[in-house]
Amino acid sequence: MMSAAIGNVNRAMHRGVVQLVSTFLEDAGLPATPKPFLARGSKISDALAAGLENGLDGDVRGLDGIYVNVTSRQDFRPWDDLDRARVGADITGKPVAAFCQWRSGRSVGDSLVVLSLTDFAKLLRSSSTP
């Protein structure tokens, strides 16, 4: 299943921003990898070979129990983006849903990560358990 660019005008921009966010998290010591993307018109066999068989995964993969979408749209729509992430997390069975909003002209480290207070408490609880 190929997903549309979440909140972005074009796929190339979305792919680039997902790569930036994933690389930033990986450089910070987290096991983050970007969702693989294929060109339009790719065959189903190409999609399966690229690991898209679970196309419902978020844009950033490898973060245990956390579903993350990425957006770079200029208008900030936190409820829409958080609802979209929550649905993805529910479908994939991940307890925490979040989205990352990158703005052009800012470093990727200045991106916002938005999650509900409930999910924030889950993250804090899991990080404080030995």
Image (cartoon, rainbow, N blue to C red):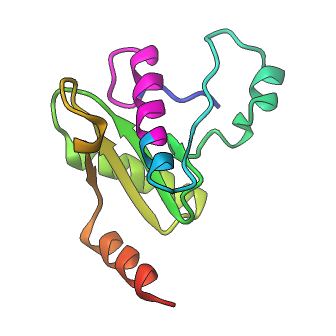
Q: Which residues are magenta?
A: 6-23
Q: Where residue 15 sits in the image (x, y, percent)?
A: 48, 24
Q: Where residue 57 sits in the image (x, y, percent)?
A: 58, 46
Q: Residue at x 41, y 59 (%)?
A: 97
Q: Where residue 98 sits in the image (x, y, percent)?
A: 37, 55
Q: Is residue 115 magenta?
A: no
Q: Is residue 19 magenta?
A: yes
Number of numbered tags placed on the structure image: 0
Q: Nearer the viewer, residue 95 or 130?
A: 130
Residue 100, compared with residue 17, is above or below; it is below
Q: Main secondary structure of the magenta part?
A: helix
Q: Nearer the viewer, residue 69 or 19?
A: 19
Q: Residue at x 39, y 74 (%)?
A: 123
Q: Residue furthest top?
A: 41
Where's the N terminus, which quadrant? top right
Q: Residue at x 67, y 9 (%)?
A: 41
Residue 38, compared with residue 70, is above or below; it is above
